[in-house]
Amino acid sequence: MVYTFKRGTHPDGNKEHTNIENLMLISKRENQALMKKGLRCADPDITMAGLAFVRLEHAIKDREENKS
């Protein structure tokens, strides 16, 4: 698991101003998928929607692999 910024970067560019409300806890797998698909955005709502998409994709893939 990794903590990452909801906005893709620190909101004001100063990493000293880290606030728990600006962070989200995600798996390394989710983080890699967000980066690979370019789903991080300065708008936290778009990043969260990207995370929901990635989680859905992973759930489908995991379920398909478990059927075999």
Image (cartoon, rainbow, N blue to C red):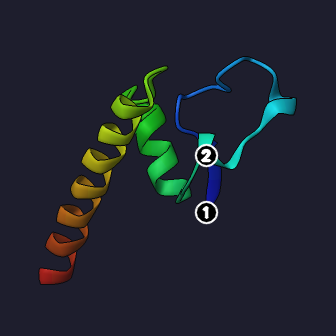
Asked whether disc 2 touches disc 1, contact meaning CB atoms under 8 Å apart, the reply is no
Q: Position of residue 50 (x, y in %)?
A: 32, 38
Q: Position of residue 59 (x, y in %)?
A: 24, 65
Q: Counting other residues with Cα less than 10 Å from the Cα at mark 2, is it few (<14), some (14-19), or many (20 or more)? A: few
Residue matched to label 2: 21
**Residue at the spot 48% in from the left edge and 55% down from the top edge:** 29
Left or right: residue 39 versus residue 1 is left
Where residue 1 is drawn, which disc sits there? 1
Left or right: residue 20 versus residue 62 is right
- Is residue 4 or residue 29 the one in the foreground? 4
Q: Position of residue 61 (x, y in %)?
A: 21, 63
Amino acid, disc 2: Glu
Left or right: residue 68 versus residue 27 is left
To which quarter of the image does residue 11 belong? top right
Q: Relative to residue 28, is residue 11 depicted above or below?
A: above
Looking at the image, is mark 2 or mark 1 earlier in the sequence?
Answer: 1
Q: Position of residue 6 (x, y in %)?
A: 53, 37
Element on which disc 1 rests: loop
